[in-house]
Structures are given as structure tokens and as C-alpha cells.
Image: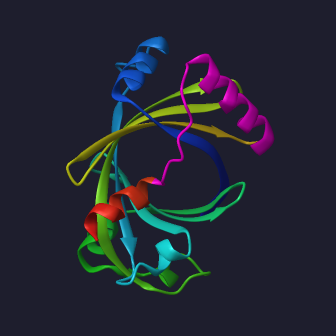
Amino acid sequence: MNKNIEIEFKTEITIEKYQELLRQFNLENNIFKQVNHYFDTDDYMLNQRKMVLRIRQKGDTRFKVTLKSQSDQGAFESHVLLTREQALDMLENGFETKQFFDDIDYFVTFRVSLDNYRVSTPYEGGTLFLDRCEYCNVVDYEVEYEVDNYHEGEKMFQKFLEKFNIKQVPTRRKSERAFICKR
């Protein structure tokens, strides 16, 4: 199991701003698809505890189960690589979280998927991501900036927003947006 702290800043953007940023950073031909398959208990206990459990799928052969726990200055992430067969079984039948993560013990089932068309580029000591998300007949766009240092990242993200004339909008996590349309 791999563990790390994810420090990211994000905001929703319009399709026009998304297209402008793709052009500005010359990323139009670097978009790749990843699918986030979200899991939770029947009463959405993980979501209530500000935890996200997903299987991220890249192509037909790369699968990883991730548990994210939110904090004020980032998210603690634990990852376990899966075989295709494991992932498909978990999607079909659910699973016990204890199988992969010692600190939580729930039976979870698949709830909703979100297709994320993503590009990334290094930017000012971090990584900039542009996402087009499709779920439940909804398409939305966001920019994320991932860094190693919270305070420096916050400053750089604010400078980025100013430079590209982007108003910061409180943005829900992808899982929350997808869950809302499935309840």
C-alpha cells in the first residue's frame, strides 16, 4: 500500500476558460481518460465522514483503489493496485474495506462513475490539472493545482487565478458532485 498527502487547490471553470487554458498551455492533444468508480455504504457513511473511496481505472488494465480522508490542509491518501479481475469483482459485488485499509471497516458497494478527461502540466513548482468531468448527464470543468507545500501552493494558485482572470468558486469534490445526482 502506498500512502501520501495530497495538497490541492481547485475551482470550477467555464468551458470557454477550459478551452483557453488548453490552448495557452498547448495541451489540446494530451487529454487522457480516467474513470473514477465511487463506492460507499448504503447510508453514505464514508461521504458523511469526508472520506472518498474509489477505484480509478485507466484504460482496460490499470486499476487502483484509493481511500482519501479530508483535512484542512490536504487529503491523506492510501492506494492499492488491483488486477482487472479484482476491480471488476469489486464493482459487481462490493467489498469489505478492511481487505485493503486497516483503519476503516465497512461493507461498500459501487455507487456511481465519473469520466474524467484530464491533462496535466508542471506549473510553478506543482502540477496543474485541467479536468472535463462527465457524470449523470452532466459535464463540468475544473482546474486543480497540486503541490507539496500548502502555504506556497495557496499563494501560487491565487497568482494563477489572477493571471488568467479566473474567479475562485467553492468547488465540491468530484465524488460529491457525482453522488448528488445518484441519490
The residue shown at (34%, 58%) is 178
Q: Magenta segment: does it hold 34?
A: no
The residue shown at (41%, 13%) is 23
User: Relative to 152, does residue 48 appear above or below in the rendering?
Assistant: below
Please state which of residues 126 and 71 is positioned toward the viewer in this rendering: 71
Left or right of 76: which side holds 182?
left
Q: Quadrant of residue 27?
A: top left
The residue shown at (35%, 34%) is 32
Left or right of 39: which side holds 120?
right
Please state which of residues 11 and 75 is positioned toward the viewer in this rendering: 11
Magenta-tinted stretch: 150-173
Residue 26, image x and y in percent?
44, 13
The residue shown at (50%, 48%) is 171
User: Relative to 106, does residue 75 appear above or below in the rendering?
Assistant: above
The C terminus is located in which quarter?
bottom left
Residue 127, image x and y in percent?
60, 32
